[in-house]
Amino acid sequence: MSPLLFALVIGGLVVGMVLALAFALTGSKEGRASVRLDVLVGRNNRKDSSADMLLKQALQEVDKKNLLDKITPKVLNLQKMIEQADANVKPSALVGVGLAAAFVGGLASAWMVNVYVAPVVALVCLSAPFTWLFWKRKSRLNKFANQLPESMELVARALRAGHSLAAGLHVVAEEMPQPICKEFGRVYEEQNLGITLDEALKGMCERVPNLDLKFFITSVAIQRQTGGDLAEILDRIGYVIRERIKILGQVKALTAEGRLSGIVLVALPIGLFFLMLWMKPDYIEALWKDPMGVKMSIGAIFLMLIGTYSIKKIIDIKV
């Protein structure tokens, strides 16, 4: 293959991957304009109508029936992770983008560097969309956890003002920012459509795996069966959550040095390996060509995994 034709193939693949990524991860212009209008008029969220919610659920159910979900239903529930991350992308599109990125990255690295780098680059490119999904999910769940104490106090104030619990959830959906307003608004819309409040709250707990949210749902279920002052219970739950978030912040500050040391110790041998592979590949080929080098490589990887696990256990303090 001539260099010009090879460059054209690589360019076409890169353009196709970028277009697929843009199509999968970006919303429509109408949706972005609606969000901007909501910000201008002072609304925190634009709630989906009941028909929109049912349509999205139907589309998700259709996408669940593909071969990917039949192969990995128990190993990786990709659809559930996408729902928890609130990502506007289908599992098939995410996997397609990852495969396209792996093919382009592996081909480009084999042409620009050498063949030995291609599998590693392809693996990194394949994991890039899933890493983005994990990061988006973690960021959304952390933001939800930080907003939960204020929402508990808001529901408690609504109950003291004489409103029902459903009306208190509606107040949170109207007054709080994303992402908690969307989840509470969905609970309110579901109970308006005829679903019991307990079932709607359990559905929110499945969408948002948060321990404090489970406490809230459990307290609501107990109060609806036995009675009691729910407003006071919610105030105490909000206070406990705030104090725990404060302690977690202190723990994160105290363990920052250990986390940075772990990152440096793990990244240093990997970075040195790729540097030597780039500068002098024949010098480092003994690590996978010589039998003793293979044993050394396996031992080094095993020891790095043990060190990473040990550092993680040291800095991971449960509160």
Image: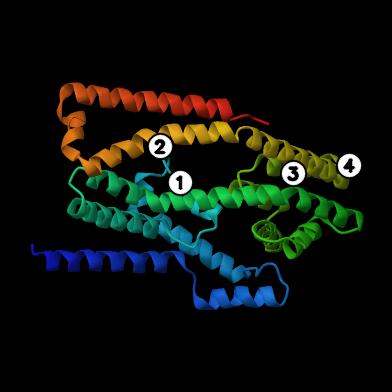
The span from disc 1 to disc 2 (Cα, nearest Å) is: 30 Å
The span from disc 4 to disc 2 (Cα, nearest Å) is: 54 Å
Q: Looking at the image, which is closer to me, 254 or 305?
A: 254
Category of crowding for the residue at label 1, using alpha-carbon neighbours closer than 10 angstroms: few (below 14), some (14–19), many (at least 20)? few
Which residue is disc 2 drawn over? 267
Category of crowding for the residue at label 2, using alpha-carbon neighbours closer than 10 angstroms: few (below 14), some (14–19), many (at least 20)? few
The reply to whether dot 4 and dot 2 touch (C-beta < 8 Å) is no
Category of crowding for the residue at label 4, using alpha-carbon neighbours closer than 10 angstroms: few (below 14), some (14–19), many (at least 20)? few
Does residue 70 sit above or below 306 in this rendering?
below
The extreme right residue here reads: 161
Does residue 256 sit above or below 42 in this rendering?
above
For numbered disc 4, what is the local secondary structure? loop
Q: Quadrant of the N terminus?
A: bottom left
> Type of residue at label 2?
Ala
Which residue is disc 3 drawn over? 216
The extreme front residue here reads: 279
Which residue is disc 4 drawn over? 228
Tag of residue 77: 1
> Type of residue at label 4?
Gly
To which quarter of the image does residue 287 belong? top left
Does residue 191 sit above or below 32 in this rendering?
above
Does residue 220 sit above or below 28 in this rendering?
above
Q: Residue at x 72, y 49 (%)?
A: 148
Say whether disc 4 or disc 1 marks the residue closer to the N-terminus. 1
Percent x, y of residue 32: 55, 74
Describe the colour scheme in one phrase.
Answer: rainbow
